[in-house]
Amino acid sequence: MERQKYISRSIIIMIILLFSIQSSFSQTTYSDSIYKAYSRGKMDKWFNIMKACEKSASHKSLAEQLELISYYYGYTGWLINAEKYDTAEKYIDKSEGIINTLLNESPENATLYAYKGAYIGFRIGLSKLKAVYLGRRSIKNIDKALELDPDNIQGNIEKGNSLYYCPSIFGGDKEEAITYYIRAVKSFEKQGLVVNNWMYINTMTALGQAYEATDQIQLAKVCYEKIMRIFPNFMWVEDELYPDMIKRHKL
């Protein structure tokens, strides 16, 4: 009887963990609007949606805090790419504060470790000189995420990113990165987390870029065409990446 109770409790805990992993990707009040802003490159609209989420997200809800972190994550990446480093640092600080608080409450949450690794990686984007010691810290947290859950979507995305962007002399490997991007894509699709999901389309785009970077041009072409079929009017692929690839490789 006691063993049966233990098994029941274990099942409940597993369900809660699975829900918390999926919740940052599932359909919410803001997810459709965020997708539309992302697909059209409207980061001003992204910012407004993110601020609305910031105001409404309950500090007691892991799912809502994970959703907010994911919006900070997308915005921070854009800020770094736009060389708006001071603002990016503010969002890194803010995000890391939330992540560390949540980890104190949920120390076995793989998604939180993946984000922790990602935000340490963002700090490298602010200062390449910190890459040597921050890179190890970033990878340690990403590996912890995959140790806790090898199928964790965010963990696989961040492992792919770390391998793709890290110089080969420090362990980077674009071919290996593809393996992790594919795992993340398959997990999105298996869990039905595809429709109007900005993180799914972003991962698919990363996969297409990795294929092209490793001279797997036909696979890149198929990947981009899949994106355009599922997500019509996604400007980055439709107007830039795909036509540039076709022209570059004379397809």
Image (cartoon, rainbow, N blue to C red):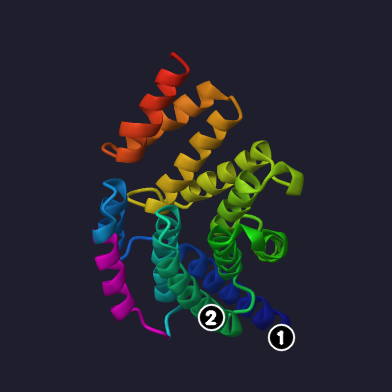
Residue projecting furthest to the top = 250
Left or right: residue 232 compared with residue 164: left
Identify residue for label 2: 102
At mark 2, the secondary structure is helix
Within-10-Å neighbours for mark 1: few <14, some 14–19, many 20+ = few
From the top left corner, tell me how far across and down residue 163 is, in percent.
65, 47
Q: In the image, which disc is placed on residue 228? A: none
Q: Is residue 226 above or below residue 154?
A: above
What residue type is disc 2 on? Leu
Between the C-alphas of marks 1 and 2, the distance is 31 Å
The image quadrant of residue 26 is bottom left
Crowding around mark 2 (Cα neighbors within 10 Å: few <14, some 14 to 19, many 20+) is some
Residue 175 in percent (x, y) is at 66, 36
Confirm whether the magenta stretch covers residue 230.
Answer: no
Q: Magenta stretch: give its range.
A: 45-59
Disc 1 marks a residue whose amino acid type is Glu
Corner quadrant of residue 114:
bottom right
List x then y, in percent, for residue 122.
54, 62
Relative height, residue 187 to residue 74 (above, below): above
* Residue 135 drawn above or below residue 112: above
Confirm whether the magenta stretch covers residue 54: yes
Residue closest to the eye, 167 or 223: 167
Residue 29: in sight, yes or no? Answer: no
Q: Is residue 96 left or right of residue 7?
A: left
